[in-house]
């Protein structure tokens, strides 16, 4: 398959890499139909974040269609449209059970491989998704891929910011920085009633 891979500071390459394969019965392989670029991808690109192995497939914002599923995956089937948050989650640990899935004890960030350990990302034709039933979310028929892609990271992060700021109906708030997450924080704040 073709994928966007990291090879060092300001050195990304679109190249052929091996197709992912199922490694556990709880995984799926997703045909990526849409992928985004996050500000944290840029941190890696400029080496403000270090440690990524050369050859790592980048990206943790993606949506697409399931093309293969492990035998224990019952919630999804081939052909289902899904999107993923930026990390995997097991659905069973303490943090998952209380709704803090980004803090999952078994979580891994898509697009981060360090010292040979980690998970390849979604800026590729295909991506392997561990713990598929807990990690993935189905895309309803009336939702566009572009809309679902936003929900996986930037909208969720913006909403989290608005929620943490305790936005109340009728209140006035300022968002410092109007990149993608800042814009989503504004949208989320408006939805929560901010003026």
Image (cartoon, helix red, strand yellow):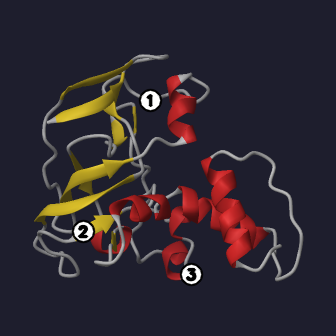
Q: Marks 3/1: CA distance?
A: 31 Å
- Residue 81 located left or right of residue 86: left
Residue 35 image offset from top left, x and y in percent: 36, 47
Residue in the picture at 71% in, 62% down: 186
Q: As drawn, is 69 to the left or to the right of 129?
A: left
Tag 3–tag 1 contact (CB < 8 Å): no
Measuring from the top left, give residue 112's x and y in whole percent.
Answer: 42, 40
Secondary structure at numbered mark 1: loop
Residue 124 shown left or right of residue 1 in the figure = right
The foreground one among 134 and 24 is 134
Would you call the spot at circle 3 few (<14 residues within 10 Å), some (14-19), or many (20 or more)? Answer: few
Residue that mark 1 sits on? 52
The residue positioned 24% from the left and 51% from the top of the image is 32
Choose the circle earlier in sequence order: 3 or 1.
Answer: 1
**Labels 3, 2: front one:** 2
Element at badge 2?
A: strand
For residue 184, say whether it is visible. yes
The residue to which callout 2 is attached is 81
Residue beneath the point at 44% across and 61% down? 85
Of the 4 image quadrants, the one containing the C terminus is bottom right
Residue 95 occupies quadrant:
bottom right
């Amino acid at each position: 398959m073709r994928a966007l891979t990291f090879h060092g500071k300001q050195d990304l390459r679109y190249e052929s890499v091996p197709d992912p394969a199922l490694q556990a019965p709880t995984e799926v392989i997703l045909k990526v139909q849409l992928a985004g670029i996050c500000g944290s991808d840029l941190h890696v690109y400029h080496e403000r974040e270090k440690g990524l192995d050369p050859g790592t497939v980048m990206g943790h914002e993606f949506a697409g269609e399931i093309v293969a599923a492990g035998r224990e995956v019952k919630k999804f089937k081939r052909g289902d449209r899904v999107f993923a948050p930026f990390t995997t989650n097991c659905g069973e640990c303490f943090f998952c059970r209380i709704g803090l899935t980004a803090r999952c004890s078994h979580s891994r960030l898509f697009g981060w491989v360090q010292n040979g350990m980690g998970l390849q990302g979604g800026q590729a034709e295909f991506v392997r998704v561990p713990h598929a039933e807990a990690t993935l979310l189905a895309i309803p028929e009336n939702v566009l891929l572009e809309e679902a892609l936003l929900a996986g990271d930037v909208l969720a992060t913006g909403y989290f910011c608005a929620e943490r700021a305790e936005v109340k109906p009728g209140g006035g708030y300022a968002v410092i920085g109007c990149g993608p997450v800042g814009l989503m924080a504004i949208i989320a704040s408006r939805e929560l009633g901010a003026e």
